[in-house]
Amino acid sequence: MRRVAAVLLFVAAGTHAARALASITLSVSANVSFPSANPNTTPVINGTGPVTATIFIVNPQREDITLTVQANGPTLVSGTDSIAIGNVGWNVGSAIWVHSIPPKNMAFWNPGNGPRALSTSPVTVITGNDGRAMTNADTVTGTVTNLFTFQNSWLYSTGTYTQTILWTLTAI
Amino acid sequence: MRHLGDTGGYLGPKAVSEGLPLKARPFLTLLVFYWLLASRTQAVTRTGSTTVSATVSADASITVSSPTNLTQGVGAFALYTGSTTVTFSIRTTKVGGSGSIVLQAAEFAPAGGPLVSNGDLTYTCSGSPTVGSPCAGTITAATSSATSVVSSIGADAKANGTGVTVNWTLANSPLFSTGTYTATVTFTLSSN
């Protein structure tokens, strides 16, 4: 009897945590591009705009939040030509949390880990905590703005090079 | 033998401790540990993707040492000589691209001295640029048309800081009035 009660307690606790964390969504900007430029005058090209990762959480309960980034392949590819993905760099431009109403505990971001070069291994962009809501309906929205750069070179073949970068949000 | 109902539904810490058989205590401890662990490690993961694209187009950059002073050789009415260093970077279109360097001179000023239009200014090219071919032989500069410095830069050419040297020769003549004469030479690097 006691064994059953303890197991039920365990299961109940687990499902409570899962229910709270199940209401998390992540959306990111679909594209970032780098226009062509003269390597002498523009050795490092800025992306056409920031890449924004938006995290939306219903009923935050002080989960630890981690956002990582990685490239889906080792190179930017244009036909048979390629450019090492390490020539693309990222940095956190800004990171904020906005609560729907004043919470029990405020969410916070720790300092970002950039600037870094992209690689195929996941690298932590930023970590934080989503705070604690007053009610089940309260929400918190985290916005992380990422700035991308591209190392220019005379030695690239002409073309349009593409690659996909992957973002992973983990909440515990 | 005690039953849960003996406490009216409440089990204080002491009651639990005393009520559990010795065999059950490690099991309960383990469950509590798992519960604590589970409540902290129930991770939720979300993913997103962004397409990154970089456009690389044909481009070029050139620097020319300036000014170039031509100095008279040894002997009466010896020719004037000097050289200009041309440094350039270039990338041409992968398919069908090309590039070149040409020069065109403006006339010497003031009047009374050598004349480009009279064929008084000639040059040769030296050096081994990593792309293209430096001019061959002696070429007479002109004011009316461009003449070659580096040619045959083909498709998908890529070079950073390569160069060529233009070696000038200017005629001398007893008919020239004394003075300092200046002409502007424009180098044009093209890439497509």
Image: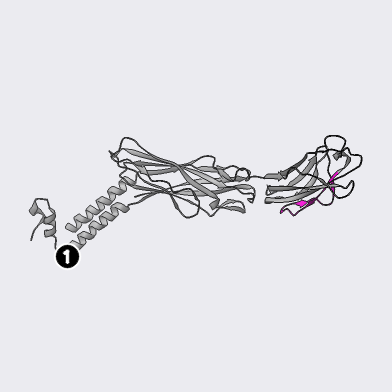
Q: Which residues are magenta?
A: B121-142
Pick the front one: B65 or A17? B65
Residue at figure coordinates x 78%, y 44% from the top left: B69
Residue at figure coordinates x 14%, y 54% from the top left: B13
Whether the magenta-drawn stretch holds residue B30 is answered as no
Whether the magenta-drawn stretch holds residue B136 is answered as yes
Q: Secondary structure at mark 1?
A: loop
Q: Callout 1, which amino acid?
A: Lys
- Quadrant of image for the N terminus of chain B: bottom left
**On the rendered structure, is B178 left or right of A150?**
right
**On the rendered structure, is B100 left or right of A113?**
right
Circle 1 residues within 10 Å: few <14, some 14–19, many ≥20: few
**On the rendered structure, is B128 left or right of A167?**
right
Q: x and y percent of residue A17 in the render? A: 29, 48
Which residue reaches farthest right? B175
* Quadrant in the rendering for residue A7: bottom left
Q: x and y percent of residue B24 in the render? A: 17, 62
Pick the front one: A132 or A152? A152
Q: Is residue A68 above or below residue A96?
A: below
Pick the front one: B130 or B163? B163
Q: x and y percent of residue B184 in the render? A: 78, 39
Q: Is residue B162 above or below residue A147?
A: below
Q: Let me know if residue B146 appears in the view.
A: yes
- Quadrant of image for the C terminus of chain B: top right
Q: x and y percent of residue B158 in the render? A: 67, 51
**On the rendered structure, is A30 left or right of B16?**
right
Residue at figure coordinates x 26%, y 57% from the top left: B34
Which residue reaches farthest bottom? B23
- Say which residue label 1 marks: B23
